[in-house]
Each structure stands twice: as structure tokens, then as C-alpha cells.
Amino acid sequence: MTRHFFASITRNKTSLIGTALVVGSLTLIVTLFVVQSLGLRGGAYLGIITFVVLPMFLLTGLILIPVGITRDRKRIAAEGEELAAAAFPVLDFNKEQTRKFLALGIVFTTVSIVVLAAATYKGVDVMDSTTFCGTACHTVMQPEFTAHQRSPHARVACADCHIGPGADWFVKSKLSGAWQLIAVAFDLYPTPIPTPIHDLRPARETCEQCHWPTTYVGDLLKVKTVYTDDEENTPLKTAVLLKVGGLAGRDTSGIHWHVNPDIQIRYRSDETRETIYDVELTTADGEVKVYKTRNMPDDAMPWRVMDCVDCHNRPTHRYRLPMDEVDNAMANGYIDNTLPYIKRESMELLRAEYATHDEAREAIPRGLLEFYEENYHEVVETRLDDINKAAEELVVIYTSNVFPEMSVDWGTYPDHSEHMDSPGCWRCHDRKHRTEDREQISRDCGLCHTILAQEEEDPEILETLNP
């Protein structure tokens, strides 16, 4: 019986190819699954091969086997050999041979279905993983993946924010991903990748799964240390009281007044959302105010309901400017702030142009060492380790924010949660948006923050708060 079964699936070329695909795919899937279960980490590509590519070959083989058997029956019938003339084979369960054949077919089919189901589940799991999103299309996604790994959301999977819960957005994301796969395969993607993503799921359905707008945060103290470019790298401190606010009872205050569930803000902008034209405010009592500008073009984008990502447009994939990176590294001890002129030299090395990351990895350490060898030979003799450590950190800073292959440079992707290095808040709060009654959108900085000290060496307020 077994011999007859295997003869039927191997005596024609089509079924033989299908059988080879099934046996080979099953063997490789099971083997690779066992190997990965034992701890092998082969990256995103191993998961793609195991749970996406091989199951496709398996399914193709399962289709080819019956196709080959059917064509073979027709060929035999045409040659006049003994074969039932019925369009479909006659199954006589009174015959032991038929029952054995059916049992063997059921076992074979069940195994195939189980493997395909498991592979489908694991395939979806692999395609929703951060490793797949960040490394499968390495050059294209390298900037976003690198920024994600350095962000507060490093342990949050890409799919949690870009897809969120529910089947409908899952299907939409996979359809969108199909085109992205084609774009990568045929080099059709732009550099840099344009932002924002206009079909991104609303933040109320993703971000607010964790960040509840009904939570009252209140005021937060932010202290920032910057260093001058003199020989001593003089530290200066700025202390700002951020009025984050939120919903306390039924009253909303502070910055997060914008996401009060009882009000709605809509706006029209250009495609980049860098320039805001008309702004519409609907208050809790139903009053509608429209703040207009004089320069809205005919091709402005449609009305958009404001949500979290209109201010927090880089919540995870944030690219910092060289001054901020160097100041943070010096304040946290990654770069020794007692090295002479380290702030000035760091800025010059980071702002230089490098064709690739490899070129930067060579040029930055060499440039920093040459400076100290020419001007501070005694520092090289006594503090070479500090110089090398600073150079390593500068390489990390550069390769985490600048990606020449994708045309991503300093400032390519501005962060709108502030207004120092990009328009940010000033996109709306600029005194240019007015109602018909000449009412303006406020530009009062005190609504959002209070500056307690600004670039002072020893702010008195910090001595009071932390004696």
C-alpha cells in the first residue's frame, strides 16, 4: 500500500517535483526550528527562511502533487490503458487498500497542515519583530533601527506603535509592507525617507495604550548642562520648570491641554507639517474658532485632527544635533570634560563630512589624537585612555545620527516637541494665526514653562533645590 502511494506521487515529473519540494521543505523547517529552539540566533533572515520562504515551497509542493496525479490519469486514459472512466476516482471503503490509502493521505495532510499553521504563526511573529523591521532591509531601515535602540522605547516592538491592536490595521500594514518590499528589492525608495507618514494609525489607538491622556503629570523640573568651547569647557546650567499638566479632575492645564478629550484641534498644513496654515479649535461647550494665516496655498493638505505625534513627531526615532549629543556625553562622563578644548574639537570633528561610517570611524579618532599631539603633548602622554574613550564616544554619536548612504545628516529630521532647533511650537504659536475678530493664538511662553535659570555657572535656584 505504501509502495503504491509513493508510486502515485512520484511516477510523473510534476508530482515528483512537488514531492521533492514537500520533503525538502518539511525537513528544513523542522531542522531549523529545532536548531533555533536550542538557542541559535541567526538574525531576521533565518526566521524569514524558516517561517516564510520554506512554507511557500511546501505549499507549492502540496499543490503540484495532486496536479501531477490528475494530469497523469488523463494521460493514461488517453493512451487507452485500463483506468476508470469517471471524472473523479471511485473510493470504495469496503476495500482495505482504499482505507489504508485514505489513512495515509490523512496523516500526510494533517502533518502538512500542522506545519503550515505553525509556520504561518511563527512567520507573522517574525515579521512583527523589531529585528525583522530593523535589519531585514538593512540600509533603508538602519537609521530608524539605530535611533530606536537608543530611545526610551527600545524594548517596545515596532508593531506595537506602527500597527497596534486589531486585525484591520494588521492587514493594512502587510499590504503596505508588500510595496515596501518591492521598493527595496528594485531600489525604488527615496533618500532620505520622507516624513511624516501620512497613513500612520492615530496616536489615540497606539500611543495612548500606554500613555493615558487622563493622567495628570503636573510640573517637571528639567536641568540641562551645556559646555562652552573654551579651553576649560566651562559648564553652564539651565533650569526650566515644564508645565506638562494634563487632566486633573475635569480641568486641563499645561502643555497637554492640547489633548483634552473635551476639545478638538484641527489644522491644515503642507505635506511635511513644518508649516501650519489654518487652525480650528472646538471647545468643550461647542464653540468653534478658526485661526487663519494669509498665505495658505491651494494645495494645502486636508484638515487633520491634532494628536500626540504632531508635537512628539520623533518619540522613538529621534536624531539629536551634535551640540546636544556632546553636552550629554560630557555631562554623563562618556567624554571627560577636563580635556582641554574637548567641546570645540568634538564639534568640529562631528560637523565634518564623511562619505561612509567606516571613514568616520577612522577620521574622528585620528583627528582628535592629532590635535592633542600638536598642542598638548603632555596630555597625550598622561591621558591617552581618556582621549581614546572620547574618540570612541564621538564615533558612536556620529554613526547614530548621520547616515550618508540614506542622505540623513544633522537636522534632516527635526523634533517638534521643542522649539530651539526646529519650528516646533512656533508653527502655531507665532502670532500670525488670527480669527476674524483678530484673536491670536497665544505666544506666552509661561503657558508651557518657566525659566528658573539660563546658562549660569552656579544657579542659585539649584543650590536651593539641591543644597
Image: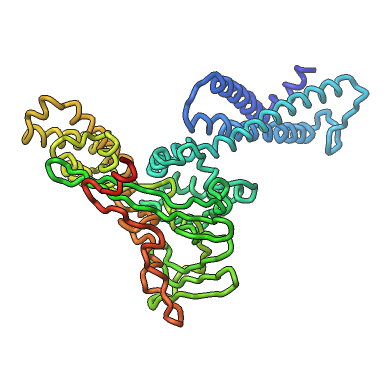
Instruction: Give the percent coordinates (x, y) of residue 57.
Output: 60, 32
Task: Say above or below: 83 vs 401.
Answer: above
Residue 49 visible in image? yes
Task: Choose top left, top right, bottom left or bottom right for residue 354.
Answer: top left
Instruction: Give the percent coordinates (x, y) of residue 454.
Output: 26, 53
Q: Quadrant of the C terminus?
A: top left
Task: Say above or below: 82 vs 326.
Answer: above
Instruction: Give the percent coordinates (x, y) of residue 82.
Output: 83, 28
Q: In front: 362, or 365?
A: 365
Does residue 301 appear to the left or right of 190 in the view shown?
A: right
Q: Residue at x 56, y 65 (%)?
A: 263
Q: In front: 309, or 146?
A: 309
Q: Residue at x 49, y 50 (%)?
A: 217
Q: In front: 379, or 98?
A: 379
Q: Quadrant of the N terminus?
A: top right
Colour pattern: rainbow
Task: Choose top left, top right, bottom left or bottom right for residue 87.
Answer: top right
Q: In front: 249, or 369?
A: 249
Instruction: Give the percent coordinates (x, y) of residue 15.
Output: 68, 29
Q: What count of labels does the image hold?
A: 0
Residue 174 visible in image? no
Q: Furthest residue to the bottom?
A: 437
Task: Choose top left, top right, bottom left or bottom right for residue 144.
Answer: top left
Q: Furthest residue to the right?
A: 94
Task: Say above or below: 272 vs 118.
Answer: below
